[in-house]
Amino acid sequence: MIDEAHLPQGLETARHEWGYCLTTYRPDGVDQDTIEGMDWHLQLRHEQLGEAVLTYLRPGGEPPTTLRIAGRSTAHVRHHHKYTDADVRRDRGFHSRTATGRTGAVATNLRRFVDELERCDPGLADRVRAVEASLPDDVEAARARLVAAIIDRYGMRVDRS
């Protein structure tokens, strides 16, 4: 089973290897050679929960068949590592800045983001701490104060149009 086969590591493993089941929510990201090598395709039907359509892709194959999907037999487990340790592309990461511009530090996952926050600008940290200490019941007011602290600390111009 290769989960999230649209991702690069899934493609490298899956290309021209037979006997694998590929799963993805983004079939447009799966390599075309891999798709052309498939024997069948199983598509979940969002309009009819609990059903899927099995299509044989080889010439002379059977017509598409509707299947009923059995209920889950194991508890769902969140893949926390996807959120904490799996890297996103560098251009999609958290880019650190100072008042003079980018620091060059880029956190490409949440663990690295936390590491960067621990090295965060102490002046900004003091301002955030002050907002947290006087946190009003109005979350929107607190959010506005945090945004104002960041804009003020880094001299940012914000286009609100």
Image (cartoon, rainbow, N blue to C red):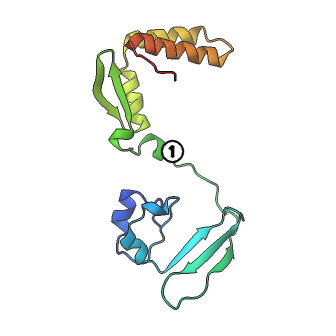
- Residue 160's x, y, as percent? 51, 21
Q: Residues within 10 Å of mark 1 (few under 14, many from 20)?
A: few
Residue closer to the observer: 7 or 155: 155
Residue closer to the observer: 4 or 1: 4
Q: Is residue 158 above or below residue 31?
A: above
Q: Residue at x 44, y 73 (%)?
A: 20
Side (left or right) of 46 relative to 55: right
User: Type of residue at label 1?
Assistant: His
Q: Is residue 87 above or below residue 4?
A: above
Residue closer to the observer: 78 or 87: 87
- Residue 3's x, y, as percent? 48, 61
* Residue 30: quarter of image: bottom left
Q: Is residue 119 above or below residue 11?
A: above
- Residue 7's x, y, as percent? 40, 57
Side (left or right) of 147 relative to 12: right
* Helix, strand or loop status at disc 1: helix
Q: Residue at x 33, y 40 (%)?
A: 90
- Residue 40's x, y, as percent? 52, 79
Pointer 1: what residue? 80
